[in-house]
Amino acid sequence: MTGAMIWVPSTLMGLGMVIWALPDRFLKMGVRLALMVLLAALVSQWAGVWHAPDALAAWFFRIIAVIAIIVIWYSDPYIEREARQHRWPPSRLKAYFALLLLFVASLVAVSLWTSFLFLWVDMEIVTLSSVVLVGIEADGRSLEAAWRFLIVTEAGGLLALIGTVVAVSASGHSLGVWSFHPALRYPLAVNARWALAGAYMILVGYGTKAGLAPFHTWLPDAHSEAPAPISSLLSALKLASAALLIYRSFQMVSSTVPAVFLHDGMIVLGLLSLLIAAGFVAFQTDLKRLWAYSSIEHIGLITLGMGFGGLALIGAMLHIWTHAVSKTLLFQNAGTVRILYHTSDSAHGAQDLLARTPWTGGLLALGAAGIVGLPPLAPFWSEWLIVAGGFVVPQYRIFTVIAVALLVAIFIGIARRMPSWLFRPGPADREEGLDRIDEPWSLLLPTVVLAVLVIGGGIGAPLVAPHLWQAVVREAFSHSF
């Protein structure tokens, strides 16, 4: 590992420990230092001061860094208000930020480390830190959601570990290396059947952590109970991290196992995730649960693109970015709604947002338009590449048609639900002029930045980083399984 692969996550973890150990007055200083570390790592990687293991790792690191900076920025004013509304003790506030930095540090490590063993350990740190953050409210509902999250995803983690050991050893790679980096592969004996068995265990194990159906049962409750910034990181980065580990693992066994078996496994889980999302989005009254089911849809779409390969794989890599900015916007917006209305449920008062809180309502409308794939917003471009890539390959056309039909159903479901928040009036007897709610810019500004990325980030990201994007495209076409 290069120095940056170690110092970036270790510095963030160290700052988390410092925040936990020092008095409360040092909390904001520690958070600002963490933002500076992430910004310095992002700028220095962009400038070529240090290099990620490959183009895909560099691409994913930049996504993680950008989203983490915005989420930590939003967390400061959001958690201050959340703690005040729910009377958090100071120790819980410190624990939140310490665990948040541990969560971010482990996500950064997922993007930069190459050892499959270290990646598995790191994904466990991602899981455990996020489990505690989901249950940080410490009430009955949040603790139940955290417990379900822990049990389901840790069962998947155990299966992923067993599958990794089986797949690595059966594919002819040294257990002493366990690396996806091509320069560190040492072919040994090969056993195709065991390699395939290990690959499918990895698919199920990491698929559980990615929230792919039918292993998604932990996800809606975890999202609805977690603080909004944690929901953002879960949806935008954690799910994609697990999907990326599946992709890396399948690359490793691709020389041993017929590629069709690997592609078919990802396509089946991708389509099933779209089906589950299509069946549930139209019945949600809480914004966070709605976007949780939307996350199942989009991680399924990313997995589908990886399964299709070729042009669709390029779309999947771009969709990791476009989904991240869109879903972070939507979960932060849901957090703002919860702070301002004391609920994010349209059945319990989160109504008439465009009239009462026009900035918050407008950001919700923009984010919803983006997440359903309306042009020219960012997710449209990546979804179009995935669908076009599926149609290019004759044997995948029927699956692409099914996927498009499910995407249309999800579009209709979300479009039908949006008026419940945006337009439905509140109590009929309220007095004129008393229903407007002040919108603090400390909460709005990070989300407005995300809105800019949703508007221009679809084709903007490859244009801003053309050399990196070209390297990602070349790598995807040359090393696809």
Image: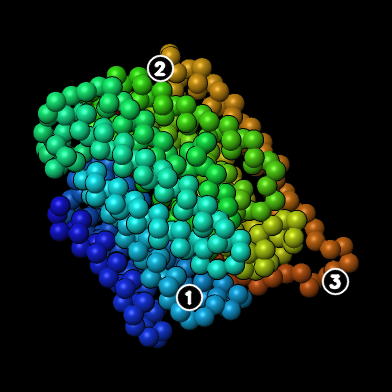
Q: Nearer the viewer, residue 161 or 416?
A: 161
Q: Residues within 10 Å of mark 3 (few under 14, many from 20)?
A: few
Q: Which residue is mark 3?
A: 431
Q: Position of residue 222 (x, y in %)?
A: 54, 54
Q: CA distance from mark 3 to mark 1?
A: 39 Å
User: In terms of sequence position, does the residue under pointer 2 or pointer 3 come before the other?
Assistant: 2
Does residue 77 show up? no
Q: Position of residue 442 (x, y in %)?
A: 52, 71
Q: Which residue is mark 2?
A: 393
Q: Nearer the viewer, residue 323 or 187?
A: 187
Relative to 299, 12 lies left or right: left
Q: Amino acid at mark 1?
A: Arg
Name the mark on residue 92: 1
Query: From what the image shows, is residue 441 above or below residue 332?
Result: below
Q: Quadrant of the C terminus?
A: top left
Query: From what the image shows, is residue 219 above or below residue 85?
Result: above
Q: Amino acid at mark 3?
A: Glu
Q: Residues within 10 Å of mark 1 (few under 14, many from 20)?
A: some
